[in-house]
Amino acid sequence: MGEEKGGFEPKIVGFTCNWCTYAGADLAGTSRKKYPPNVRLIRMMCTARFDPMFAFKALLNGADGVFISGCHPGECHYIKGNFYSRRRIAAMRTILKQLGLDDRVKSYWISASEGVKFANTMKNITEEIKELGPNPMRDKIL
Amino acid sequence: MKGTELNYGDLEGVLKGLLENKVVDCLILPRRVGNNVSYMLVRDKDKIATPESVIFAPSFGINAANIVKGWMIAEKVGIVAKPCEIRAAIEMIKLKQLNEDSVLLITVDCAGAFANEVYAANYADIGDQVDSAKIKELAGKGISIRDACAICDNRLADVGDIAIAQAGGEKAVVAGLTEKGEAALSAAGLSLEDKDLDRAAEKEKIEAEAKQNLEGLPKISSEEALEEFLRDCIVCKNCRDVCPVCYCKECFFDQPLGNPVGGDLLNLAEARGAIEVPTNQLLYHLTRVYHVSTTCVACGACEDACPKDIPLTRFYPVIAKKVQELFEYVPGKDAKEPLPFTTYEEDELEEYLK
């Protein structure tokens, strides 16, 4: 509460797959790419492990943003896990869009070799969420 | 399509014939209770009396498909119900909650239904069956059909195995929609002829009307509006229990993580300073709407079951419809069509992830 827009540092919960985006984040680190430290990554073996309930819970508990990323479609370590998760994420975002909650959800595909893309994406989504301001649900009794 | 035109009085014989000739081992049929309508499970054909006075009755209490949830035995059950109920049963077949080989789905035409307490209270005005003109006339008197029925675009008997369609006056067309349905009707002793049950013009009219009614429903379009909408929810989970397509053996919200007690509650309050109790009000509905988003048949049973009279039709079917449009999926249309979350295409949906 009471944070000025300029000084607001969002907390973003990131759900990333072990094989691509998490390794991409690792590459960004080892190649010393700078990016804002606002994202807290949660590593899962595959984006197919991502349950939309995770995003609902994060948002209701006051996360300023939710970031989901895994292997590019067609490059899943488990062959087709992200095809299924793509359908679930699209359904989840369709639901959230109707309720006006979708703008805090960001989904990307970032591979293990895309350290630069990972760093740039972090910069961009942090900026976008700063623009939105703090999640109003954080200080509500929910 | 094969079928035959009958007088209303002959329907009793058709249903009795299904039982008598062992086409089915039992039938789920609507029955009259005072001024109201409920369902019965019939084994003895002599318990069937004047079904024509009740199978078209515009009253909705529960979704009949819910009765056969978990019917995995070999004995055959026939269900005579409205299109939304039959569509729910078809979704249950796909969800492996109902044995496809042991169910005979018999759909009746529906013009829209009243909540069953409304129906009972106004039985003198409503009568045994209605058409769209009668519904408009009743609406003028302040007796309105359920919101779920007003936005329903699947009112004609065109799903399931057998259709019982109103053919004007005291006539009905009984027709087999599948081979199984045609075989069942022949076995029940009906002589079938080629029958054309194409009602495209009527369907178009219903769809246009439904679309208009859907647009007229108040929208829940912000987080504040959602909170306000669910303010009175007591998280009794009745909407889940009556929902035909909500089927988990043990619901997440009955488990410790979804239904925290004691120390878990205290810890949650510790983390946030204060929490709403009963807990997980919003999370429960958000999760549930996602779980039913592809299979919701928009029957509105959730709204009828809500003890707090929350108009849940504005939430579950309306939101689910958008998800179904995304996958171009109509729940309950065809038991052979895969559920959207069990299949995929290699190149799709990228525009929805931006």
Image: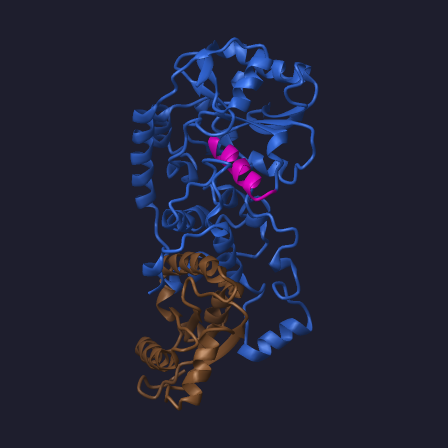
Chain colours: A brown, B blue
- Which segment did they paint magenta? B83-96
Question: In the orientation shown, which residue stands out farthest toward the bottom?
Answer: A32
Residue B136 found in image quarter: top left
Q: Nearer the viewer, residue A23 or B241?
A: A23
Residue pictured at 50% horizontal, 24% vertical:
B178
Residue A122 location (% of width, % of height): 37, 80
Residue B222 location (% of width, % of height): 36, 62
* Residue B12 seen anywhere in this rendered image of the structure: no
Residue B42 found in image quarter: top right
Q: Nearer the viewer, residue B25 or B307?
A: B25
* Residue B142 seen anywhere in this rendered image of the structure: yes
Overall secondary structure of the magenta stretch? helix
The total number of labels drawn is 0
Residue B27 found in image quarter: top right
For the C terminus of chain B, the image quarter is bottom left
Q: Nearer the viewer, residue A41 or B60?
A: A41
For the N terminus of chain B, the image quarter is top left
Query: Where B158 sits versus B337, above or below?
Result: above
The question of residue A73 being in magenta is answered with no
Residue B117 location (% of width, % of height): 52, 34
Left or right: B327 as drawn, with respect to B281: left
Residue pictured at 35% horizontal, 52% vertical:
B219
Residue B10 location (% of width, % of height): 53, 10
Left or right: A5 as drawn, with respect to B294: left
